[in-house]
């Protein structure tokens, strides 16, 4: 029998985005809102009202994601081409056209013509003339700055050394982040990571059903994970709603494999939203009890992640009892669990901690523009506090798995080392796994299995 602690939400104000006439126009609409507000990409997509055919919606997302991925390089290429800044809508048209030029790599005339015709519809005839003049120059600039060059202006030979700021421009990343990666991983690995981040991410699904997988799900080298081929989104949505699959990157399996949930255990998922890992734990243990804890958004704000957590907890196997507990792990004492008739200690605790997301920038494409140089140290301090709080809830001899979707040692090895060094209770690091996109072929992650006592 399942028990779920209810959490209410006030109705949010409507900020819906009405889609344009097709995927291209919708991409301009999304890019316009992003350029004006720098709102989170996932939040903008959530605001997009239904109405586009699946193929056009996919096109809109592809173009919009391309604009965000390459924003810094597109902005630099546009610099100086206009006497004064145009309306944000016109900038958005130029950004979408610019990304198409980057992607096509040649023959931009059709792209320019298409952008001009769209500008007539979305803006004005006069602004369409501006788009025509600027887009032609933009095409030449993007073609020219796409060639990696030496200090004297010559073409850089393949594999030649580049300064971090040159790599940052070429692959549209913050220079401080590129420099940090070069110190941590070396020049070759950094270039591979930059190239990885700029590519559209495949869609993966974890198959949960006992039925045979449909043909449009292609097997991968990771057991239980399949790549979703294009053109089947309606089928995927129906299967997801029925609980037959869950869209999830294969890197997710690493922390669950270390946690090794067993039948009839009592397990705490300490930072549970949006619930994919709670569902994974339940699928592995099949019988037992899971408490899913996370901090919901402030009153009055719509919390999509918490809503998905509640929805995902309704899909666990019938033999698993689940409870949803809203709260801040750092501020909740074990006795607080008792007030909810929940265990005060657990056989195993999973702490998938909030982090910089440096391992998942292929999926979370706007993270690199929001992340600041000092944020990683702030994340590490918060992660250490969360790890200490989670440790209080593990029974003697129990397991604690700490994981992140970061590739930065400051958020992985160094947090765990600090925790063990300064803990009053003895803890042993039994195993750990570090995944790097350019090596493992999926999102980056760190996962650490700690044993109490």
Image: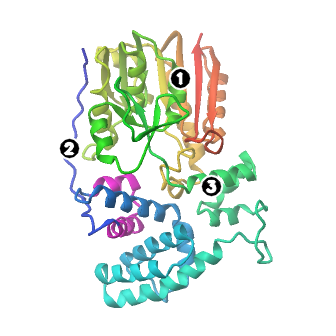
Tell me where the magenta segment starts and ends, as one range. Answer: 24-48
- Residue 83, relative to residue 56: is it above or below? below
In the drawing, what numbered circle is on residue 10? 2
At horizontal 36% and vertical 36% (from top left) the residue drawn is: 214
Q: Of circles 2 and 1, which is in front?
A: 1
Residue toward you, 438 or 323 = 438
At horizontal 35% and vertical 30% (from top left) the residue drawn is: 327
Q: Is residue 335 left or right of residue 68?
A: left
Q: Of circles 3 and 2, which is in front?
A: 3
- Is 42 covered by the magenta stretch? yes
Q: Quarter of the image containing the C terminus?
A: top right
Q: Is residue 451 left or right of residue 322?
A: right
Q: Quarter of the image containing the N terminus?
A: top left
At horizontal 44% and vertical 37% (from top left) the residue drawn is: 248
For mark 1, does the 10 Å Cα neighbourhood hold few (<14), some (14 to 19), or many (20 or more) residues? some
At horizontal 40% and vertical 50% (from top left) the residue drawn is: 230
Image quarter of residue 236: top left
- Dot 3 or dot 1, earlier in sequence: 3
Q: CA distance from mark 2 to mark 1?
A: 38 Å
In the drawing, what numbered circle is on residue 194? 3
């Amino acid at each position: 029998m399942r028990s779920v602690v209810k959490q209410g939400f006030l109705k949010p104000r409507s900020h819906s985005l009405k889609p344009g006439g097709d995927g291209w126009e919708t991409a301009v609409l999304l890019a316009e809102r992003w350029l004006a507000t720098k709102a989170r990409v996932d939040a903008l997509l959530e605001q997009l009202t239904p109405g586009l055919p699946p193929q056009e919606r996919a096109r809109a997302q592809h173009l919009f994601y391309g604009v965000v991925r390459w924003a810094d390089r597109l902005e630099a290429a546009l610099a100086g081409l206009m006497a004064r800044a145009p309306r944000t809508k016109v900038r958005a048209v130029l950004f979408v056209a610019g990304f198409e030029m980057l992607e096509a790599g040649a023959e931009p005339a059709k792209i320019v013509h298409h952008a001009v015709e769209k500008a007539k519809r979305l803006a004005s005839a006069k602004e369409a003339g501006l788009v025509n003049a600027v887009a032609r120059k933009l095409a030449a600039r993007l073609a020219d700055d796409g060639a990696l060059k030496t200090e004297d202006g010559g073409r850089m030979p393949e594999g030649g050394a580049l300064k971090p700021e040159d790599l940052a421009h070429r692959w549209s990343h913050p220079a401080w982040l590129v420099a940090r990666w070069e110190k941590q991983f070396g020049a070759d690995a950094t270039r591979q990571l930059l190239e990885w981040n700029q590519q559209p991410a495949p869609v993966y699904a974890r198959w949960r059903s006992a039925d045979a997988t449909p043909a449009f799900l292609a097997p991968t080298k990771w057991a239980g994970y399949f790549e979703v081929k294009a053109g089947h989104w309606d089928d995927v949505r129906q299967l997801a709603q029925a609980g037959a699959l869950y869209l999830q990157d294969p890197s997710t399996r690493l922390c669950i494999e270390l946690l090794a949930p067993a039948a009839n255990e009592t397990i705490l998922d300490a930072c549970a939203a949006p619930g994919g890992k709670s569902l994974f734990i339940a699928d592995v243990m099949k019988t037992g009890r899971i408490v899913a804890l996370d901090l919901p958004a402030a009153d009055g704000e719509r919390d999509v992640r918490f809503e998905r957590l509640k929805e995902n907890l309704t899909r666990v196997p019938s033999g698993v009892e689940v409870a949803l507990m809203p709260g801040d792990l750092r501020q909740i004492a074990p006795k607080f669990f008792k007030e909810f008739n929940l265990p005060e200690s657990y056989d195993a605790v999973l702490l998938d901690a909030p982090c910089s997301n440096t391992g998942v920038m292929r999926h979370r494409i706007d993270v690199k523009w929001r992340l600041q140089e000092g944020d990683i140290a702030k994340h590490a301090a918060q992660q250490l506090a969360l790890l200490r709080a989670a440790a209080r809830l593990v029974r003697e001899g129990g397991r604690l798995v700490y994981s992140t979707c970061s590739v930065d040692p400051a958020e992985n090895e160094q947090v765990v080392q600090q925790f063990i060094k300064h803990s009053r209770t003895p803890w042993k690091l039994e195993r750990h796994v570090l995944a790097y996109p350019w090596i493992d072929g999926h999102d980056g992650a760190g996962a650490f299995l700690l044993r109490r006592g």
